[in-house]
Image (cartoon, helix red, strand yellow):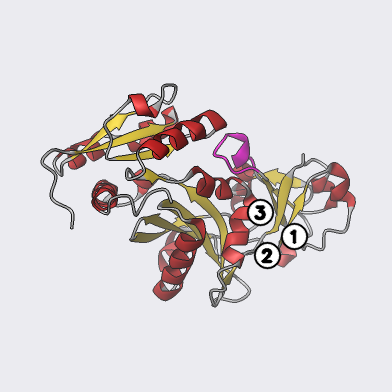
Amino acid sequence: MSNLPSKPYRIGFALTPKKEKTFIVPSLLSHADSNDVVFVKIDPNRPLTQQGPFDCIMHKLYGSDWKQNLQDFSSQNPHIPIIDSPDSIEILHNRISMLETVSKLNVKNSGVPKQVVVTEVADLEKNLELKFPLIAKPLDADGSETSHKMHLVFDNDGLKNLTPPLVLQEFINHGGVVFKVYVAGEYVRCVKRKSLPDIPEEKLVNLKGSLPFSQVSNLAAAGGGSGGEGCEFEKTEMPPESLVKELVKGLREELRLNLFNFDVIRDGRNKDNHLVIDINYFPGYAKMPDFESVITDFLRDVVQKGGKGGEN
């Protein structure tokens, strides 16, 4: 049984400047401080073994040097939890290995959209056995600017503008609403957000080529689709709690991660069916209600468990 600390828990953090700006905010620092948790900035260019002391390390940095730095620290400090294991995080850096995780779960009324990997331009000319429209996503999902550049593709001509490697995924009408499920250890929160508009079959005949995601939202305004607007968005029911819990439990076990979220849509062809379309490591928790207390409680819990919540 853990004793209460005689001094604050020291949480070392190593984040990109962008992530640090949105996560290490005054409200979090204040709440954490009042609950005996302090955040200590790590210099990723120096050995972790020369920094600290730390009761826990949380990070969202990539690269072989950083990974080696973590491994060196962990070998000397096996009881200090690291959130999370670089090997586990890397599963989410590839959109195929990411969603293969979901396919392994065998959770009733859930799955992933039909998709294929395209590694070469020549592959785009083959029969892909997918139904238009398609979502074209870069294969890498490493949080970089290019990893977010996606297109909605309406026909074979639209495929010609794409640059492999990428994933082509069937676009499923889903009422213009996406459900984001945030996970922080044992904590789970599902929220709904507006998404790409539905595209009725009769509108598809007039849509040619491809569109960047940034322009897809204009489809609804131009009469090309309909989606989670106003009153309809508010009326949209959340996914069944039992389904969300099963998905979270399965993903947590498969991924061995503490900090992640995943996007779920309700299949417009079968309202009971829900599809996972994306999984993100260490997402934008600051957008979540009460994130300060959620994160603080999570970190205290990890430290008090003595590393059980950290790297395996």
Q: In this view, does 217 lie above or below 105?
A: above
- Identify the residue shown where x is 82% and y is 63%: 129
Q: Nearer the viewer, mark 2 or mark 3?
A: 3
Q: Residue 200 — which label?
A: 2
Crowd band around label 3 with a 10 angstrom C-alpha radius: few (<14), some (14–19), many (20+): some
Q: Nearer the viewer, residue 244 or 104?
A: 104
Coordinates of residue 130 in the picture (x, y in percent) = 78, 62
Image coordinates for residue 178, horizontal then vertical, percent: 50, 59
Q: Quadrant of the N terminus?
A: bottom left
Numbered label attached to residue 204 = 1
Image position, residue 235 (x, y; %)? 42, 68
* Position of residue 131 measured from the top left corner of the image (x, y, whole percent): 77, 63
Q: Which residue is drawn at 72% across and 53% down?
A: 168
Categorize mark 1 by other alpha carbons within 10 Å: few (<14), some (14-19), many (20+).
some
Q: Mark 2 near mark 3, Cβ–Cβ under 8 Å?
A: no
Q: Which residue is drawn at 56% across and 45% down?
A: 90
Which three-letter amino acid code belongs to the residue tagged 3?
A: Ile
Mark positioned earlier in the residue sequence (2 or 3): 3
Closest to the camera, between mark 1 and mark 3, is: 3
**Residue occupied by mark 3:** 96
The magenta region covers 140-149
Q: What residue type is disc 2 on?
A: Pro
Horizontal side, residue 72 vs residue 170: left or right: left
Does the magenta segment cover residue 298? no
